[in-house]
Amino acid sequence: MRRLLLLLALLSAPAFAQQTQQAPGLPGGDPSVQSTAPEVGAGRGGPNAQVPETSEPQGATGGPRPAAPQATAPSAPSPAPPIAAPLPFTGRGGSTAAEQELEAALRGGTIGGRVSIPNQSAGLLIQPDGRDWRQFRNRVLVTAGIFAVVGTLLVVTAYHLIRGPIRLRAGRSGRPVLRFGWLERANHWMVATSFILLALTGLNITFGAWVLRPVIGPEAFTALTLAGQAVHHFISFAFLFGVVLMAVLWVGQNIPNRRDIDYIKAGGPLGRRHVATGRFNAGQKMLFWAVVLGGLAVAVSGYLLMAPGLLDNVIGQQWAHMAHGLLAMGMTAMIIGHIYIGSIGMEGAFEAMKDGTVDQNWAREHHDLWLEEKLAAARRTVAPEGTPPAAPAE
């Protein structure tokens, strides 16, 4: 029985192999049904089996041999397809919000949005005037301040070294004349002190980052600047009050007249020709109006910066800052010249604001018409009109 089963197995093996090599419905030698083992070697296809001459994969048995691959010339790279632009996230159509904002900036317009708070200026994001203001703050104001303040100091120093102070030609007489009362002097020193503090703190804001910070360090500079800002804000009220009171006290005596033109033509205090003047000459009158009008303007522009809600938008604040800076620099240069002439530049001038009196010879050389008025008033006080002259002593 065992022998019979072995004989049946041997007889059925060639038929099974043939079925695996050629499945029904497929062409003979299809690679998809080929065995992975090559038909080579003894007992593997018989003595007539062909041995492949290469180790590369062979074609299907009985089928056509594959053609050898042929080298082809490299083709030119095909152009990349264009990248489609993203759809704009806007309903405007044609251009995005960023493109429209760029076009507005190039045209000199502003870029802003909508806000739900009362301060509508908070919606202003970009405005070209800001670039102009920044250039003014960092270049124009700094340059103008250097020319105004440093230039005036150099001119005054050079003049003092070359010519020296203006001396009294006739010397001192020893007879004082009252020139300013206590209220005039008190108000003058209040305006002078407040202006000096305002000028120093303002100059620190403009030049302190380049002049003081490298010397005292950033921490000390920050503390000094914050304290100076508080002084600048609060002392401005004293300055404004003094300017208004100064206008009330002296406006009637500072009205220009024809003698002021002659005084200017003669060269003012530096001229060689004497011109009769009243209590204030042309130079003092110009200083008065510059302090009054300039002081009011610089105070108003400063208060607009302290209370920005009074202005409609940031552009108004920028204009207020530019006006405040230029006026302050001009007034600082002018006051430097006034301080020089009223202290060491003219002999006897400082006494007028120190104790209120000046020497009679000083008054005759610089304000002779005013001196005649003072002497005439003194004579009327001593001998009123209608009083008969005293009889000569026998």
Image (cartoon, helix red, strand yellow):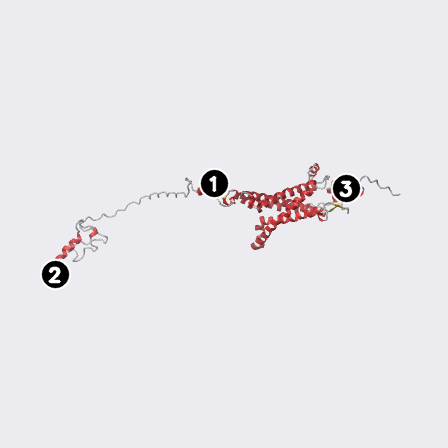
Query: Is 172 positioned to the left or the right of 25 in the image?
Result: right
State the image coordinates of residue 330 (x, y, percent, origin top left): 62, 44
10 Å crowding of disc 2: few (<14), some (14-19), many (20+):
few
State the image coordinates of residue 229 (x, y, percent, origin top left): 59, 50
Instruction: Pick whichever, 166 or 361, lies toward us.
Output: 361
Task: First in sequence, mark 1 or 3: give its number.
Answer: 1
The reply to whether callout 1 and callout 3 are in contact (CB within 8 Å) is: no
Query: Is 115 positioned to the left or the right of 390 in the image?
Result: left
- Residue at disc 1, secondary structure: helix
- Residue at disc 3, secondary structure: helix
Q: Which residue carries the number 2 mark?
A: 5
Residue 48 occupies which quadrant of the picture? bottom left
- The quarter of the rendered structure image containing the C terminus is top right
Q: Which residue carries the number 1 mark?
A: 104
10 Å crowding of disc 1: few (<14), some (14-19), many (20+):
some
Q: Which residue carries the number 3 mark?
A: 377
State the image coordinates of residue 285 (x, y, percent, origin top left): 68, 41
Tell me which amino acid carries mark 2.
Leu
- Residue at disc 2, secondary structure: helix
**Spatial separation of the CA atoms under disc 2 and disc 1:** 99 Å
Tell me which amino acid carries mark 3.
Ala
The reply to whether callout 2 and callout 1 are in contact (CB within 8 Å) is: no
From the viewer's perspective, is the residue at label 1 or at label 3 nearer?
3
Query: Is 135 positioned to the left or the right of 360 in the image?
Result: left
Q: Is residue 223 visible?
A: yes
Task: First in sequence, mark 3 or 2: give its number.
Answer: 2
Tell me which amino acid carries mark 1.
Ala
Instruction: Pick whichever, 88 or 134, lies toward us.
Output: 88
From the viewer's perspective, is the residue at label 3 or at label 2 nearer?
3
| Residue at x 10%, y 61% (from the top left corner) | 4
**Spatial separation of the CA atoms under disc 3 and disc 2:** 165 Å
